[in-house]
Structure formats: structure tokens, C-alpha cells
Image: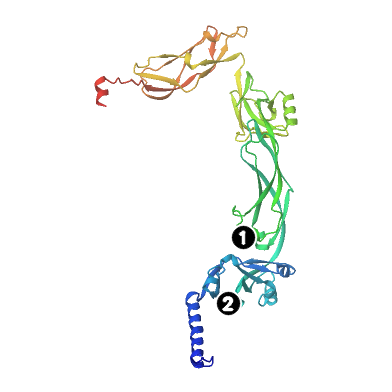
Amino acid sequence: MKKRKLTDNIPLKLMSVIVGIFVWLLVVNIDNPTTRKSFVIHDVELLNQAYIDSMGLVSLMEEDQDPIRVYITGTRSTVSDISESDIHAAADLQQAISLESAIERNPTTTMVMVPIAVTCTGISPENIEVTPKNLSVRLQKKATQEFVINATSEGKPGSGYEIGTVTANPEKIRITGPSSLIGKINQVNAVIDVDGATETVIDECDLTIYDKNGEPLTSTQMNYLTFERQVTVTARLWRVQTVSIDGEYSGVPADGYRVESVETIPSEITVAGGEDALKELALSGNTIWIPQEAIDISGKKDNMEIKINISEYLPEGIVLTSGSSTDVFVRVNILPEGSVEYEILTSEIQVENLAENLQVTFDTAAINVRLKKEDESMEDPDAESIQASIDLEGREEGSYEVPVDITLPEGYELVEDVTAEINISEISEVTEITEEENSEE
């Protein structure tokens, strides 16, 4: 048997190797072909911002910037595993195109183009393409301004307590950023939660910045600003106290008249204050006094009523509770000399000549009757000796102001006519439902 030599059929063997390599390349490219994938990048890091900061400038990204698209070329198995988080896009401000000439043309605000460099782990630079190739960056003059912090509270304190004072520490804040954005700032707020609190609350609170339209700055705008993001806010709670209101007056009424009484509506209000202020108020009998110069009755012959702002007369350290009205009405009742005033309950007024199918109600619980003695030596009559009645003959349904007939004991006369406001309505009858009607239902 003859032995075969390795050198036999060399051309055929070479052809087999070449065919094998070709088949291998064909299989590889069919199973894992080269592909191209695109990504939209939302964040581009600005490098070397200190470079423009040294020129007194800050950088702002254009809000209407075209989307940054990155195209990566590679095998399908490699590209398919890439996500946006694997891609890093950066723009070096030192590489800004024609930076110095742009600043010379407009040192306050100018637009420059900065080349975008993109890297991706496992991908060579030549297989990465970015469009657009440059990032639009606005350079603007840097400005610094101080703002007072408006410290407020949210929530409702526990029962019996009110917000006394809310303060921030520090009370003002220094903010640095683009001059155009600094110029838009109107207010800096810090809000502390006091819901259910019954003692002083201290907390670290975030600052919220509002523009001149009352809108909060966006997160993008906030990122352009440099400032301390939190401050310490203290909310001190004050105890609530119910107090009386009393008033004095100045001057004298007309000859032959006198002041019968001074009353306030309301007669009591709720206030809040620190412990020291409440102790001082207790020494005054827990009473808020309206000074006499606020009410002048000089020459008056009739009752006088005046509306005042009670907050103007609160002692130092005392405030109205939230939701309380500042309006208080002071009524000075002025009567002729020798006269007295009685209060007659409307339930005691005799109703006469009302049709049987009608009923009457009074708008008030009582009416006031003023009497004058014929002789100053006479004693005041008993209230039971004063009789009141109304005549409703011919009256139909509706609202009326009717005269009240007053019968007085001998030796007394009315100072003025008395009227009462009433409502007349038809008596409603209950309709009985028969068993037959029930069965039909």
C-alpha cells in the first residue's frame, strides 16, 4: 500500500482553506451583522465653566436647542446592549468657537457654539457620530443680589393655638446667576409645616423662588442659580384667648339728652399672643378697650353707631386669630333726659286680626321701647306693665314693617314710635294618605 504525501493536491487543499474562511466570515456576518443605532441625548455636560466664570460670565443652555442625536456603529450584539446611560456627551467651554470675539461684540450676553464630544464604553471614537456637532450656549453677565426670605406656614396648629411668628434664619439670602434670571426674581419663600403642632416648630425648609408673574422657577432655571437651598425656619405658637370689647366716648350729647349705654357687636373676640402679652392682657380684665377719641358723641340726639378696625387697638404682642373679622360696631344709645329703654320680646307681642289660614313670624327676637316719665320723681315701670300688640287686619302673605301699639302705665309716654318687621305666610296643612293611596303606591 502506497503512502500519501502531505504535498499531494496542494492547490485543492488551499482552495478548501479559503472556502472555509469565507464560509466562516459569511456565517459571522449573517448571525451578528454590523448595525447602526441612534440615541437622543438630553443632558450635555458643560466642562470648564470656571474658564468663563473668570470673565464674569455664566452659561445657559438654549431652551429651544435642537435634539442631540448620537449614532453608534458596531456589531448587533454590541450595539443592542447600549443604553442612553452608557453615553456621555460633553462640551468644553474652552473650545468654544470664536469665544473672545463674541464677547468683545457683546460683553453682556452672547451666543457661542461649543463642539460636542461623545464617548461610549466599548465603542471607538470613529464609530460614534453626533449631530448637531456643536452645542448652542448663551453666555451672560453674572449677577449677585440679596433677597429677603418670606417665611410662612402651612397646616393648622393644634386646638387652642395660633401661629404667632414665623421667622427664617438667615433672614435674607444671596443668589448668584445670569443677570436676566436674577432680574426676574420677585420673592423667595420658605414654608414650614405646623399641622397639629402645640409648641414651637423648628425645621430645615427648602427655598422656593418665584418670578414677577408669581410663578415658581423651573428646575432648569434653579440649576443656573447658586445659593443655599435650605434655611432654618422657626414657627412660634401663641395661645388663644377669648376677650371682651368695651368702649369709651368723648363729648356730650345735645341738651336734654344723655348716654344710656355703650355696646359693641360683637361683644367678645378671640385673640392670640405670647404668654407675657396674655399676662398683661389679664391684668386689664381680658378686655380690649376702644379709646374715647375714636367715638365722639358731641351734640347727638339719636343713637350713634360707628364701625372701627379693632386690630388698631390691640395691645402689643396680641393679634386676632386667623379668620377673624377686624370690624367691630360700637353703638352708643342716646336717650332724652328722664327716659328709659325697655326690651320687649316679640313672642310677647299680641297679634290681632290675623286671618285664620295665615301665620306670622318676627324678624327679630325683641324690640326696643323708649319711655319718658311725666314726672322725674316717678319710679321706672315694671316691664310686665308694658303691653305691645300689632293689628294685621287685611294683611296677606308677604313681608311687612308694621307699627306696634304700645300700652303704657299712667304717667309715661313713648319717646318715639315703635315698629316691627314681620313675615306672613299661609299655614301648611298635612295631607293624610289613605290606605287606598298607600296600596296604589
- Mark 1 or mark 2, which has the lower sequence index? 2
Residue at disc 1, secondary structure = helix
Instruction: List x then y, in percent, for residue 231.
Output: 71, 49
Among the 4 quarters of the image, the one containing residue 426 = top left
**Mark 2, other Cα within 10 Å: few <14 / some 14–19 / many ≥20:** few
Q: Which residue is mark 1?
A: 220
Write the residue at 71% across / 64% down: 142
Q: Name the image quarter holding the C terminus.
A: top left
Residue in front for this viewpoint, 220 or 367 = 220
Q: Which residue is mark 2?
A: 127
Residue at disc 2, secondary structure = helix
Q: Amino acid at mark 1?
A: Thr
Apparent side of residue 375 relative to residue 287 in the rendered image (left or right): left
Residue in front for this viewpoint, 127 or 153 = 127
User: Does 339 appear above or below 291?
Assistant: above
Instruction: List x then y, in percent, for residue 358.
Output: 36, 19
In this rendering, does residue 42 appear at all? no
Among the 4 quarters of the image, the one containing residue 113 = bottom right
**Mark 1, other Cα within 10 Å: few <14 / some 14–19 / many ≥20:** few
**Mark number displayed over residue 394:** none
Q: Amino acid at mark 2?
A: Asn
